[in-house]
Image: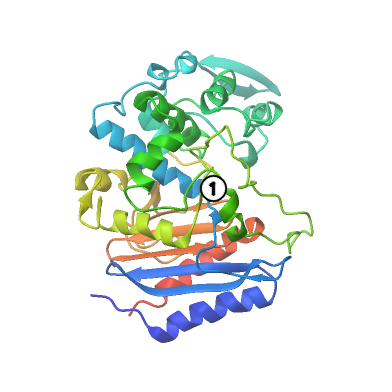
Amino acid sequence: MAKLNAQALERLRSTLQQHIDNSRIPGAVAVVALGGYTEFFAALGSQDAAAGKAMQPDAIFRIYSMTKPLVSLAALMLAEEGRLQLVDPVAKYLPEFGGRKVAVEQGGEVVLQAIKREPTVHDLLRHTAGLTYEFLGSNAVQKQYEAVNIDDRGRSNLEFCKVLAALPLAHQPGSCWMYSRATDVLGAVVEVAAGQSLGEVLQQRILGPLGMRDTAFAVPADQQHRIAEPFVNDPDTGKPTVMMDGRIVPRFESGGGGLLSTAADYTRFLQFMRNRGTLDGSRLVSRKTIEWMTSDHLGHIPALGELLPPGHGFGLGFAVRLQAGLAPQPGSAGMYYWSGIGGTSFFVDPAEDLFAMLLTQAPGQRIYFRSLFRHLVYAAID
């Protein structure tokens, strides 16, 4: 069995501290676990630099897209109960998604084409439903997302879906992988299939059973002093740093990016994933469902954009590494991971029986530190 090198772990700590001292990030909480045991835990820097408050181990972070694996798991739990199937068209649960058109730009004009097949629940889980994210570019569909303020937290999940479904698709369903609003739509599908709000589904099926006490779509008033804050201004651009306000209870329970959580809570989820569906002797989902969830579901479907590095595919809520080489970061085949736009990231490496997580609130610096953290963790494996 692999071991972790104490000197290399100290280098991980000192490197993060150096970047904090240089005002690159305000602070961070880092976790590295091997064989199911936490071998490294560090709370460094400031939880709120403007207020002069040191980082606390129980700080609450906006985890944004690290919400996606939890919502994906909820959908698969409903599938285990026969409440939905991945082959189902999205329109079975949300009729407004039936008969969509695809926007194709030709000669400076946008032409609407009929879809070749309906997007399915499977497409939502693996981001092949033809949807997009407004912040990933400026094509015709992305501009339409912006025009309707698609990220308005004042709409309910079902209201969000009605607004989104009125817009054309960016791609033919199943033709490509495009990171997108798909998991937000999946959250609404989960609501219809379960007959409950997404927050209720997550609390009853995952957060409660796993003991994730501080994970929710908003932070209660008596716990708001624990929220980790970014720098007031981005250290690279000097522009104000804008992040989701976790103090306000949103109507939009974003399945793609709405949760806040802590290192302790999300470690519980990663331990559950490492155990392939069990925690503390209680099984929430089958071992085969976890194996299926963390396998590649793209095959030869091309991935658009730069979010999936070479040698990677995508499962049901996670990126999945397909081979040890090609990518510009170390790793093992079968490793799966994801991250949040606010500066949080994790990965699980079954081959090494390792998982690790970095939580910070630094949107503009997230890509650099995501890569740096992974390099430093793998450098500690003996």
On the rendered structure, is 82 left or right of 220?
left
Q: Quadrant of residue 138?
A: top right
**Does the rendering let one see residue 314?**
no
Q: Residues within 10 Å of mark 1 (few under 14, many from 20)?
A: many
Q: Tell me: residue 343, above or below residue 248.
A: below
**Does the rendering let one see residue 17?**
yes
On the rendered structure, is 196 left or right of 275?
right
- Name the quarter where the C terminus is drawn: bottom left
Foreground residue, 149 or 306? 149
Residue at image mark 1: 64
Q: Tell me: residue 319, above or below residue 371.
A: above
On the rendered structure, is 343 left or right of 355?
right
On the rendered structure, is 122 left or right of 175?
left
- Identify the residue at the far front of this view: 222
Which residue is depicted at the point 56% across and 78% down?
15
Foreground residue, 227 or 339? 227
